[in-house]
Structure formats: structure tokens, C-alpha cells
Amino acid sequence: MPSLIAEATRVNDFVVKFANVNGTGSASANSLIMKAIFRMGVPVTSKNYFPSNIQGLPTWYEIRVTRDGYAARASHVDIMVAMNAETYSKDIRELRSGGYLIYDSTWPRSALLQRGDITVIPVPLAKLVNENFDGVRNRILLKNIAYAGVLAALLDVDLEVINGLLSESYGKKPKLLDSNTKALRLGYDYVKQHLSSPLPLRVEHMDKTRGHIMIDGNTAAGLGCVYAGATVGAWYPITPSTSLMDAFKGFCERYRVDAQTGERNFAVLQAEDELAAVGMVLGASWNGARAFTPTSGPGISLMNEFIGLSYYAEVPCVIFDVQRVGPSTGMPTRTQQGDIMLCAYASHGDTRHVLLFPANPEECFYMAVQAFDLAERLQTPVFVLSDLDIGMNDWMCPDLKWDDAYKPDRGKVLSKQDLDGLEKFYRYLDRDDDAIPYRTLPGTSSKGAYFTRGSGHNQYGGYTEDSAEYQVVLDRLKRKFTTAAKYVPKPVLIGKGTHAVGIVSIGSCDGAIREALDVLAQQKIDVDYLRVKAFPFNSDVEAFLKSHSTIFVVEQNRDGQMKSLLTLETAVDKSKLHSILSYSGLPISAQPIVDEIRAKLAEAPRLAAVPR
Amino acid sequence: MSYINKPKVAHPSLPTNSLGLTRRQYEGSMSTLCAGCGHDSVTAAIVEACWGLSLQPEQLVKLSGIGCSSKTTAYFVGGSHGFNSVHGRMPSIASGANAANRGLTYVGISGDGDSLSIGIGQLVHAIRRNVNMLYLIENNGVYGLTKGQFSASADVGTKAKRGETNSSPPIDPVLLALTLGATFVARSFSGDKAQLVPLIQAGMRHNGFALIDVLSPCVTFNDHEGSTKSYGFTREHYHAAVEADFVPRAEEIAVNYPEGEAIPVSLHDGSRVVLRKLDPSYDPKDRTAAYHYIENKLKQNEYVTGLIHIDEADNTEFHNLNRTAKTPLNSIPFEKLSPGSATLHKLMTRYR
């Protein structure tokens, strides 16, 4: 039995990382452990680091057990389940001093034991599984379940809870249920018989996940589209947005198919490319359906021309950009917030677009609904800027709720009756002095017929090359963006709002920042935090920038795109803004934020002084 | 300019269709194309076809991309919605619009540049998707708005206005559509209204993607000696294989063809197309044979015109395959689309 390095017991606060080979079925074993801990009432985060590949390359899965309910990735690993010989040396390096390495000792690796400050836990997994099961594929799959059993014993995960999960998954397939239960038990019993357990790092029942779910942002966004009443989805497959349309389609097949006739109240069009996908969205939205397309950065690059048409011809359009690492093809399976500037000003000419920044899957659900309301109210493209971390990882969120009193905001659409009461219909006239014109749908009435075009047009909807007429429309579009600032969701303020130092951030940085605020508060550094939820920035953003003398802009890209947008679109003094950037492709964690803020304030203590 | 309105006055004796509308009421704004442009004749044929079908103007949706041809959607049926989108991308707008409301009649007007170069990908996939629409290519072999460059439909050996000879092989939209399995493929000439009008009517009523390639000479850049898309050349090398008469539902009984001469094809809405073969060896229902026939004639510099291929029995139309609700998607009440709070509450257990 290996000697365990003495460590104080740490309950419900540690990180387990699984190093696997992709395509071996490890995901189900990993999420089995994650779900079991969650069901024990203990908050968890889960991060999947996977290759852009189908089979054979390294993949990692990280579970952070966090009794405090932090949502961010931790920047250390306490327990490494090393199942990929190819990455052993990298994986062992990543372990924190005092950590544990679990590995398959069927093939002993003395080189692994070279680090003196960790505990190596050898388990002959392949041997155990091969002795008990037949079939190559079967053995590979069940080895994963066996290490889940090992972890269950080491971490004191409730075996009943795990068995409950297994019966839910394989309840209808008794053979599979039997083999999985047996494999789980193999690993579990091995630990109980040969090792001391549980480890000082372990799990205990809590009651902090009641009323919560584990869901990924793409599923939540797809569900949001269903609830928003979207009927047309058009897309071209691209990682990491694909699962959004898969979810939409799946939910539609469940909720939108007439039981009697088999008729479908939705249409999903898999387009030939992203240009066509967004074109379909424009065509469908123009024709009165709620339509959307999910994509990622490279797709946005391709969609630029149509985005400009949507802006100028004032056709509603909802685009989900699940951001990944750029530039170019970049790292398709890693996360970033690198499309902020691209989306804010997409397409040639003077264009500015509405952006929403969900911070987690829960917001993906609600913002999906908001996006349609905004796009139809404002008759313009609306981007939901999610990212791979939110979109593809399971996050702990409060249960999604729906208000049955919700009525979709379809915006200013004239009916036949409305048109009958009008002397004449003019498409681009600002009748209500809010810079939003009225539109009509094809098929309504020939009195409402007009010609939609991306070429120069006047406020009556006619073609023009007249400078003054052109400018009337362009100036109104600018005013419409001011109107948009009143409709978009307000930012979230954490803190009193009266400190000298502030953080401004967006989207998936939220978890890391909230955690950093706690750490900073323990160190008597008080910081206000404003999470911007949308562009255009409304007056609350402007006020926060004005009232703080030192502002850290935290974001996940190299060039400080949000900081740039703030300097371009607000009156903020640029010298007050300091970037804290994370662009490794891994989700941002709290520690670097704490370190950078402390370093900056130490270097210039006056920065922390309350102004005036 | 297209915003100049034509005078509203119409002579009281103008004939009306079953809706009581005159042909004038199917016109649009003034054409801004060159005098004598083939496209204006096509526009006139569309006006005639819509009037003849007694189409409610608001039931028509006009779609186009960019180019001379794409401008023409403003010149017919002013009482219907039009969407002049971006270059080569009209098929995606049409696909989305059609997905949202299957109840309207969709007509897309494109050109050889718009369809065969920048937009060939979208054309190909709209055919594959079998979107229920009439897709009309006004084919003149040149880029007009940018002053006379060869397009992808220019024939080998044809001469540009400035004397340059084209050496790249042409893409023929008819052969392309046949290859892709289009269920309605026709070719015509802007100068032959008698042939074109029933083709447009049948194409509008066909349940699926209907492609009509219309040779439509460019008087400014491609109507000279040495051009294979000039009025003169087209008239001489134009070879009608199949004549098609469109028979609206109401008139069905009145039309009588001697047996043996005519092939009637029933369209899904109850109207009919009656095909009359001018070449006895030709079978418009046999796609493979049609392909070889057209290809052989093209080698001899002959444009085969008429309703080249029709397959009304095909049920691969987009909504048929998708099993979309009969009620247009844009008209389904919100309550039927949004599953409600109780369902969401129940669904949450899946994520615990």
C-alpha cells in the first residue's frame, strides 16, 4: 500500500482531472462521477478539454468540487486520473504538490513515481476488467466505469447515488446495467481491499444543489429558441455551436410534432454554408417567422455581407455566436471571447449591432428569448455572444423557469386592418419618433407591399442615389441604436458601487471574477464589479465608468476587445482602464485576476484611493 | 429610377381577369434597363403570366440578387413584396422565406452572373433542397452593370464587344439542373412571349423547384456580330423541342387536344400542362434522355427550348420531406409553439 502524504481533510473542495484518449467512451464515466457528486448536494463545475478530432487524441475532463459554489475553473489539480500513457508526463507535472495520481498499474511505470511530493495510487484497471469481461470495445468502455468505482471509493462518493444514475441510463438495457454495475464494483472493491480510503480529499452530503440543474449553454439556448417560438432554424455545422441546433431540433421533435398528423411546427435547414444559413434566417424573419442561426467566429466572418443587409434593410436576425479560439481556424475546441469587435461592427459601411453577453447557461436560455424580442422590436441583427466554455460545458444553474404570461414582442408589424386605416404605407418612415419604422409581411395586403433592398433607399422605401435622402435613413439608423440602448438588458452591479476600483467584464468571466472578489475581500481589497450584459452600453455602464477611478476590464482575448469597445462607445478616459486578459483557450480562472489586481494596486497604491 | 410611378390611369376597356384586375395592375415601377433589353420582355411575360393566372398580387413574393436581371423584380407586380438581396444569395433568402410561409407563390429572378458564378453554390443547393419556387435566369452571357465582362454562360468562341474571344467553356444552367435532379427544367427566349408565358405559369404552379433559363440578349454589351447570345444568333439557333400550354383549373374542360399529339401533366393544384412534342424522338419525362438530347444539340450550337423536363409525381419538395405543418409556420399561434412552464418544470429532472 502506498504511503499517503499526510494532509488535513478537505471536504467538498478539490479538483479531479481525468486524462483520457478521445473516442474511448470516457465521457460517460466522467460525467457519472460529476453527476453523483452534484446529486449529493455538493456544487460542482465541469470542464471538458477535448481535441478537434474523433478518436485517438488526448482529452481531459475536470471536475471542481466546490462547496462555495464557484463557477470558474480552478487553476490547480488535486487528483489526476491518468488514463492516457501518451500524456503521463504532462499530467503528472500539472498536479499540485500533495496531490494524488491514479493510474492503471497493469503496466507499471516507474518513471511516474519520480515526483516525491505526490501520492501515486496504482490500480490494475485493465487487468481487473480483462479478467471479468470479454470483447475489446466492451473492455475499453468498462475500464472507464471501473475507474469511476475507484474514485467513488477514494472520494467517498455515495455508491447508491451512482447506482441510481446507472439505472436511469441503462434501465431499459439490463445487460448493460449489469456490466456497468459490475465494473463499478470492481474498481470500488479493489480500493476497499487494497488501499486506505477515503482520501483526505473527499465528498460529504450537502444541500446546496436543490433547485439546480447541470446544463450546458447550447442546450439551454436551443431550449430558449423553442420557448421563444422560433420556427425556422438554419445552420451550417461548426464547433462549438453544433449542439445548439441539435438541442433545438431535439426539443422540437419532442414538443412541436402533432401527435395525430405527425406534422411539424418547425423547419430546420442545414445550409450549404454559413452565408446561406444567415440568408435563410433573413428570408424567414422577413416573412414573419422567428428564425435564428447558431455559429462560431469563422461563420460570422462569412456572414458579414448579409449582416450588413439585415442592418440596412432592417430585417430581424438572431445569431448565436458560440465563440472559439481564433484567428482563422484557430483552436476550434478551445474557448475565447474573441469576436466582440467582429460582431459589434460586422459588415462594410457604418454598422453597429446589438450584442448580448450571457454569463452562463441559465442566461443563454433567457437571452435566447430576449434576442428574438429585441431583433423584432428593433428590426436589426442581434448577436448572442456565448462561448465554448458556456456552450459545451455543464454548469450548475438554478432551474430554468418560464412565465406563462410572456407574450413575444413581435415589434411594429402592420396587419391588414392597420394598413386599411392608413392613407399610404411607407416602410422606413419614423412615425413614432423612436427611429423604429413599421414593417409589413408578405401576403398581408398589396397596400403594404414594398421593396426590400440593400441598395440606397429613402425613408419611403424607394430606391435613391440622392445624398440627402440617403442620409435621412442612415441618421435614423444611428438614432435607432440609441433606442436600442434603452431596450437591452441592464448591467449587473456587484458591490456598493462606491469603491474607487472597479471591474468591468462580460459573459463567462463572471464566475472567476466573483471568486476573485471573495479572495480580494479577504485581503481587504474592495472592488466593485459591473457585468455588462449587452451592447449598446446603456447609461448604467457610462455611470460606472465615470464613478470609478481605476477600472480593470477582464476578458478572454489578447487585444482587450471589450476595453476597445468601451473606449470607442463611451466617454470613459482611456487611461483609467487596465486590461486583465486570458486567451490561452482555457476558461479563465480567479487566481490570475487576483494576482493582477494586487500587483497593479501595489505598484501604484494611489489607484485604490477613492476619488475626490 | 424605379421609384417613379407610372400613371395610374387605365383605359376602361382594358380586359380584366377573374379578380377583375387589368394587366396594368400587375405592372411594377418603370424599368431603368437599356431600351431593347431582353429582360424587359421577360418582365412583360411575367406580368402576362400573373394576370392570366389571376394571382392575388399580395400572394406573390419576388426575390432577386444583384445585377441587371435582379433589378427587374421592381418592374412587375408592384402590389407584392419584393426582396432584392445580395449578389448570388437569393436562393437562401427564398429558402428561408418559403420555410416560414409555404402558402405564397415565390418567384426568383436571377442572371447568369448571379446564378452561375457567385451564386452557383446557392442555386445548386436550392435545387437539391427542392424549394417550391420559380427560378428564372435571364441569361445574356455578360456582366452588364460592370460593362461587359464575359459571364460563366458565355460560349467558347463568342466575341466580346471589344473583340476579346472567350475560351472558357460555358456552364449551362439547363444541364446543371438536369444533373441535379430538378423536377421542372425549361428554356426559352425573351423574344418568344408565346412560349415563355405558359412556361412561367406552369413553373409557378409546379410543386417544387422550377428552373427556366431565358436567353435574354444584352443590347448594350452582347448584341454584336460574333456574339452567340445576340438577338440574331439566338433567333437562328433556337430550337423548340416541346411546346407547353398551361391550362388553369377552371378552363380545363374547354381545352381539347387531338389524342396522340399531346401529353397532359397534372399539377398539384389541379391545373395542367399540356406538352406537345415538336421532335417526335424527344421525351420530356425521361431526364437522362433529355440531358443527352440537350447536350448533343448544344454541341451543334443549338439551344433547345420549351419545357425540357417535368416530373410532377416527385414528392421531394422541401415541405413534403420536412412534413411541415400545412398552416404556414409564421401563422402558428405562439401558444402552440412555446411548451409552457409545466413542461419546463418537468424537463428539469433530465438535468439533475
Image (cartoon, coloured by chain):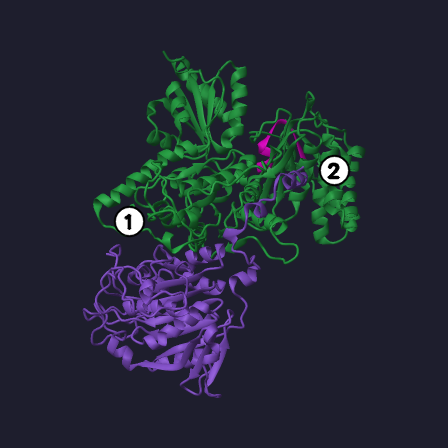
Chain colours: A green, B purple
Is A602 on the left or on the right of A124, as rendered?
left
In the orientation shown, which residue stands out farthest toward the top?
A: A612
Depth check: give the residue in front, A454 or B17: B17
Which mark is in front, 2 or 1? 1
Residue receiving disc 2: A162
Label 2, label 1: how far apart the Cα atoms are: 64 Å
Residue B247 on image: x %, y %: 44, 75
Q: Residue at x 63, y 57 (%)?
A: A262
Residue A605 on image: x %, y %: 41, 13
Residue B287 on image: x %, y %: 48, 77
Residue A72 on image: x %, y %: 56, 30
Depth check: give the residue in front, A30 or A143: A30
Question: Height in image: A508 above or below B30?
Answer: above
Q: In which image quadrant can residue B50 be found?
A: bottom left
Q: In which image quadrant can residue A79 be found?
A: top right
Q: Quadrant of the C terminus of chain A?
A: top left
In the orientation shown, which residue stands out farthest toward the right?
A: A193
Which label sits on residue A457?
1
Question: Height in image: A145 above or below B9?
Answer: above
Amino acid type assigned to the residue bearing label 2 in the image: Ile
Q: Which residues are magenta?
A: A89-102
